[in-house]
Image (tube, grey):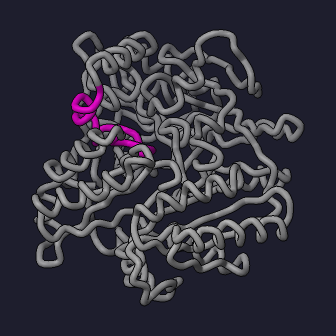
């Protein structure tokens, strides 16, 4: 059957655009090198119609489909399982910009477009597409939509869902839904767009999207702020929201541990606050649509009031674009700094901003009781309550010994986030890494509703089986988890 399927796929999209598993090893391994899968074929369709045709071929051969964009995900959602029955669908050839509409402030692109290229297209048109991620040079719009990606500008512009007006989707039966309507108001029934966004390829295959554009800011101001406590940082955030309003674009948290790690791993990089005694820092960005003078005046006024109210310990204000870019390097280099220093346990949690201080204080203490000496590298998007609560091994231990406790330690973190009204995944998704964890934090009613949606839109479990929701007996295809290469991300 596999030979017939392979040949049929070659006939569908062209022989040169279908690979065998041993020809696409990198695509069968996730970014973290945690999961390794295999596939009957790796297919590169060039159009939505070819995607639909491939789906119909797979349905006829009972071959599940896994969709992959830039393969930058952290949860193994784009890696096929280890049973070798799936077809891996790469959307790299669906990379066209279909329309730029500056009157409607929209941009319609295909799912395989690299995020940074989309940003560049918008900028050339005199507009801003504000989604900004560390992986923007390689991640794709399809992957951003599949995980409802967040990034550093959620505080002002929202997640990918809020930046999307319409979608084009290939269903599990190979039908094409053209919902590429650039409408900001369309109250004509269920919002299918929002259903597909964030579904990690389990409900349909997103092939194109109509995205929102915004005016390019006339000025931006950046500062690195120092705080005597996390509580002070949270109070300052409320003050900044009131003072800046919608102009407040980013508020990215970093601990003193993070700055020390950055100095260690990037000795030639920015070195702010080397001798500072403060334990918490935040990267603040203001985007102004008036003028450079207006932005600076607002910036200085809000920061000045914060100093007077003792909401701020110190501030380093960028005086040029080069200085601003240097400060942003601190945030952008955090993931790479951790990678260079060795593996750690990564937790992408979200809690209400009002609960951030309690969550961090209580969880830090909880981990020290259970795992003395572990080191916290907490950073991320304080402006929207999303923290990357990462935990490294004690200095008197080893990475391997630390990682052996991954399940137990992570459950403590996730239980604490849940107890504070939070989520175990803010922007990275569930994939296969958090699949078994989900029932612990979702109610039976919520999980049942999710399963009913899955059953309705993908009754034969053809799309990304074994991700987000565990397969059920009623599904015709079975799924084994991809082979894990190690026990931690």
Residue at image location 83% in from the left, 61% down from the top: 218
Q: Position of residue 438 (x, y in %)?
A: 27, 32
User: Left or right: where does residue 351 sit relative to residue 171?
Assistant: left
User: Can you say whether 302 is above or below 249 in the image?
Assistant: below
User: Left or right: where does residue 249 sit relative to residue 22?
Assistant: right
Residue at image location 80% in from the left, 55% down from the top: 216
User: Can you say whether 47 is above or below 78 in the image?
Assistant: above
Q: Position of residue 208 (x, y in %)?
A: 65, 32
User: Magenta stretch?
Assistant: 423-442
Q: In which quarter of the image is residue 449?
A: top left
Furthest toward the right, the residue is: 103
Question: Quick one: quadrant of the C terminus?
Answer: bottom left
Q: Is residue 453 a member of the stretch shown in magenta? A: no
Closest to the observer: 49 or 4? Answer: 49
Residue 89 visible to the viewer: yes
Q: Is residue 424 a member of the stretch shown in magenta? A: yes
Question: Quick one: quadrant of the N terminus?
Answer: top left
Q: Position of residue 408 (x, y in %)?
A: 13, 49
Closest to the observer: 105 or 479? Answer: 105
Residue at image location 48% in from the left, 84% down from the top: 273
Residue 24 visible to the viewer: no
């Amino acid at each position: 059957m596999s030979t017939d399927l392979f040949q049929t796929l070659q006939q569908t999209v062209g022989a040169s655009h279908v690979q065998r598993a041993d020809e696409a090893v990198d695509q069968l391994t996730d970014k973290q090198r945690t999961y390794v899968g295999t596939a009957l074929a790796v297919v590169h369709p060039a159009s939505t119609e070819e995607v639909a045709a491939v789906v119909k071929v797979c349905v006829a051969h009972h071959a599940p489909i896994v969709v992959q964009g830039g393969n930058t995900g952290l949860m193994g959602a784009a890696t096929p399982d280890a049973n070798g029955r799936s077809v891996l669908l790469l959307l790299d050839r669906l990379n066209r910009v279909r329309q730029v509409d500056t009157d409607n402030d929209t941009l319609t692109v295909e799912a395989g477009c690299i995020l940074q290229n989309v940003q560049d297209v918008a900028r050339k048109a005199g507009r801003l597409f504000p989604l900004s991620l560390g992986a923007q040079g390689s991640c794709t719009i399809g992957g951003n939509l599949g995980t409802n990606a967040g990034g550093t500008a959620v505080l002002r512009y929202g997640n990918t869902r809020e930046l999307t007006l319409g979608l084009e989707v290939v269903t599990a039966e190979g039908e094409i839904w053209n919902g590429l309507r650039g409408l900001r108001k369309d109250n004509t029934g269920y919002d299918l767009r929002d259903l597909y966004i964030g579904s990690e390829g389990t409900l349909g295959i997103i092939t194109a999207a109509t995205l929102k554009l915004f005016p390019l800011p006339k000025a931006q101001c950046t500062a690195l702020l120092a705080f005597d406590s996390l509580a002070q940082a949270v109070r300052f955030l409320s003050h900044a929201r009131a003072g800046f309003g919608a102009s407040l674009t980013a508020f990215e948290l970093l601990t003193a541990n993070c700055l020390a790690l950055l100095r260690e791993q990037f000795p030639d990089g920015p070195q702010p606050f080397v001798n500072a005694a403060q334990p918490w820092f935040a990267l603040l960005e203001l985007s102004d649509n008036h003028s450079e003078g207006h932005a600076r005046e607002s910036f200085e006024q809000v920061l000045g009031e914060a100093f007077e109210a003792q909401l701020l310990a110190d501030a380093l204000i960028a005086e040029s674009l080069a200085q601003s870019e240097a400060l942003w390097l601190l945030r952008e280099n955090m993931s790479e700094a951790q990678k260079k220093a060795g593996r750690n346990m990564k937790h992408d949690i979200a809690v209400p901003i009002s609960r951030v201080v309690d969550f961090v204080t209580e969880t830090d203490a909880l981990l020290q009781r259970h795992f003395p000496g572990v080191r916290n590298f907490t950073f991320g998007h304080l402006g929207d309550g999303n923290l990357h609560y990462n935990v490294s091994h004690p200095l008197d231990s080893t990475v391997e010994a630390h990682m052996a406790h991954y399940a137990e330690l992570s459950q403590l973190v996730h239980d604490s986030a849940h107890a504070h009204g939070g989520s175990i995944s803010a922007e990275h998704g569930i994939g296969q890494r958090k699949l078994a964890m989900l029932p612990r934090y979702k109610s039976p009613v919520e999980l049942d509703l999710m399963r009913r949606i899955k059953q309705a839109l993908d009754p034969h479990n053809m799309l990304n089986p074994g991700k987000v929701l565990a397969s059920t007996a009623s599904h015709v295809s079975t799924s084994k988890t991809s082979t894990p290469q190690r026990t931690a991300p």
